Amino acid sequence: SMPGGGVALMMSLNCRPMINHFKPGLPALSSMIRMGRSCVAENTTIGRLHEPGMITLRCDLAAPDVRECLATATGLEVPSPGAIVSNKDHSVAWMSPDELLLILDRDDLPDRMETLEAELSATASLVVDTSSMRTIFCISGPDMRDVLAHETPVNLAPEAFGSGTFRRTRFGQVAASLWMTTDGEARLVCRSSESGYVEDLLRASAAGPRVGYLAS
């Protein structure tokens, strides 16, 4: 079993059920790795985070009170452009000059929402629960970069895309964001309404030929 008591039930590409003791790259979210539909290719594991909590925060990120509020609510600083920061309980990703994405355990979401709304009540801001709007995939294994590179224009070379790097981009024909949790694991977030399409692309890429150019 995994931290938090979860066991990930994986389904291989030829539909043979198998148990995979998934080791998440971000300990803060380990209790959320209880994936439903997922698959294991020869060198790549693909799964979904189980009901992660997500908060979209729109405000002036340079304002001192916003930085203080974020530190109070998450213990983290505002990330630099193109970056994601994490601690034991939260991750905060830079989405745009006035937008952050907070990722946390769903059970902790109401308290974080209340803290953010209270701390920013005198500031022009928007705090929205977007948990149901988005899906997060976990992609891991030695061919992970090659699998992702089939469908995104992001430079995924290890020297250009490492832990803490966050990119808003496209995956196939839909908008998505990518980041690394460890050298061997990436996360991909997309709209939940488009998650079936993204999963199909990931499965097809994982089953396809390997180029090996981006091997970690």
Image (cartoon, grey):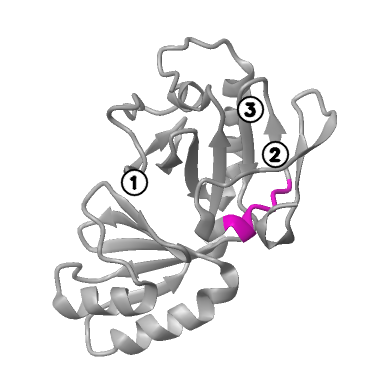
- Residue 165 located left or right of residue 63: right
Could you tell me how far apart the alpha carbons at marks 2 and 1 are, in whole angstroms?
25 Å
Verify CB contact (< 8 Å) between mark 1 and mark 3: no
**Identity, as a three-letter code, of the amino acid under mark 2:** Ser
Q: Secondary structure at mark 2?
A: loop
Give the number of the disc on residue 146.
none
The label on residue 203 is 3
Residue at image location 82% in from the left, 28% down from the top: 15
Q: Position of residue 48 (x, y in %)?
A: 62, 47
- Location of residue 12 by image quarter: top right
Closer to us: mark 1 or mark 3?
A: 1
- For marks 3 and 2, the one nearer the N-term is 2
Residue shown at the point (22%, 50%) measured from the top left: 81
Would you identify the image quadrant in which residue 206 lies? top right
Instruction: Read off the residue under disc 2.
Output: 38
Reading the chain from its start, which is encountered first: label 1 or label 3? 1
The amino acid type found where label 3 is placed reads Arg
Residue 205 magenta: no
Task: Please provide the residue range marked out in magenta.
Answer: 30-36
Residue mark closest to the camera, 2 vs 1: 1
Q: Quadrant of the C terminus?
A: top left
Q: Observer-nearest residue: 113 or 132?
A: 113
Mark 3 Cα-neighbour bin, 10 Å: few <14, some 14–19, many ≥20: many
How far across and how far down the image is residue 193, in percent? 58, 50
Residue at 85%, 28% in the rendered image:
16
Q: Is residue 33 magenta?
A: yes
Q: Nearer the viewer, residue 137 or 4?
A: 4
Residue matched to label 1: 164
Query: Considering the numbered disc 1 on the image, is that residue within a helix, a strand or a loop?
Result: loop
